[in-house]
Amino acid sequence: MQKVPIELVKPGMVLARPITNEAGMALCAEGTELSDTIIERLKRMNVSHVTLKGHPVDLGCETKTKEQKIEELKMRFSRVQDDPLMQKIQSAIESAILSLEAEKEAECATEGGRP
Amino acid sequence: MSTKVQHLKVLARKIQSLPTLPKVVEKLMTMVESPDVSPKDVGKLISSDQVLGARVLKLVNSPFYGFPGRISSISHAIILLGFNVIKGVVLSASVFDLMERTMVGLWEHSLGAAIVSGTISRTLGLSEPEEISTAALLHDIGKVLVRVSLTADYDKIVDVVNAKQISFREAEIEILGVDHSEIGQWLSREWNLPEKLAIPIAGHHDPDAAVRFKDRVAVVHIADAIVRACGIGNGGDPWVGQISHKAWDTIGMDNVDLPKLMKRIMDDLEEVEMYQQGPVE
């Protein structure tokens, strides 16, 4: 899943999340394959970003590595690291980060997206 | 008289006027107190302010209320979610309007806390998870008041956080003599918020002191720490605070598969980012 500015969206890309109007009602369902017409219409409705399946657009170094994420996690917990409950929570989040990263890698591999 | 009460009195005098709530919101606050008000009347009132109406619909259609993209009218939302939730949502829609531009980090922190509270409440099978989410959405409302009405003090607090590397709350106490939960408590009273929302707002940093609605206070307290732990939004400083062991035990968090819960929470928290992507600026 990747959030992408509308300018970079190309026909054939698939929505991972629905697009909603100002009242939160869905305009375009999850799973929709975007066409030129739909993209043009979204631009006219001032939709700025869409969330796509896989990782179809290379935005450069926009994502943090899992090592960076875990380093930041450690920093956030730095003031409570002596407490056993907080240690338990930290390690639960660490394992969640790792498992989400693994899913993302698998998703990229099967859809041929760039990591 | 305790010094805290004195501090609050000084602040109240300094805050010449509360951030002005739209007329509609004031009317609504008195209206929902009446025993024979109908969802239709309230829906009509909220919809009479088009911008507010749209914001309320956007919030109730957000994924953390469990009916994403399916609520088409405000009276429908009231029937599904109840008056307390609508009251909280209307308040946050108008209050957070003030901060969406200037305090995006706090808005994301608040949305995140609402999502985490909903996930925890549903996992534990607590009653009225929507109300608990709404209390979490409003838990830092005291910070908004300081930002909007005591701007000079707010800037000082930010400076102290940076200079001394202390938490935002410690800096508030140093500058104001009270923290945002006490300011939030005072504000809840001024705005006649229902106790189910007011008590968690007041108690989210001191859940052990809660006498009533202990479960709700505990959930909001824990959600506040977890949303920080996951690195979502900005609560004023980057550190995760100590979670009360008593609050953890009160709601039976030890019986939960923690790694599984955290994974679900991190999945759900992606919604915070997604929530911002609609055409409304």
Image (spheres, rainbow, N blue to C red):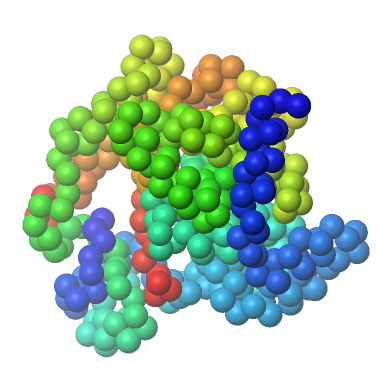
> Can you tell which quarter of the image residue A18 is in?
bottom left
Q: Residue B197, position in %: x, y?
A: 68, 44
Residue A11, image quadrant: bottom left
Q: How many marks?
A: 0
In the image, is B270 to the left or to the right of B142? Answer: left
Q: Nearer the viewer, residue B153 or A13?
A: B153
Asked if residue A11 shows in the view, the reply is yes
Q: Residue at x 64, y 78 (%)?
A: B49
Q: Nearer the viewer, residue B100 or B76?
A: B100
Residue at 36% over, 12% down? A82
Say which quarter of the image contains residue B73: bottom right
Q: Is residue B66 visible?
A: no
Q: Is residue A8 above or below residue B271?
A: below
Q: Position of residue A89 (x, y in %)?
A: 39, 24
On screen, residue A74 versus residue B33, left or right, reads: left
- Which quadrant is the N terminus of chain B positioned in? top right
Q: In the picture provided, is A41 more to the left or to the right than A20?
A: left
Q: Tell me the quarter of the image containing the C terminus of chain B.
A: bottom left
Residue at 34% x, 80% y is A46
x, y (%) of residue B196?
72, 42
Q: Residue at x 48, y 30 (%)?
A: B174
Residue B201 coordinates in the image, percent (x, y): 62, 40
User: Which is nearer the eye, B171 or A15?
Assistant: B171
Relative to residue B139, is residue A6 depicted above or below? below
Q: Is residue B276 above or below residue A81?
A: below
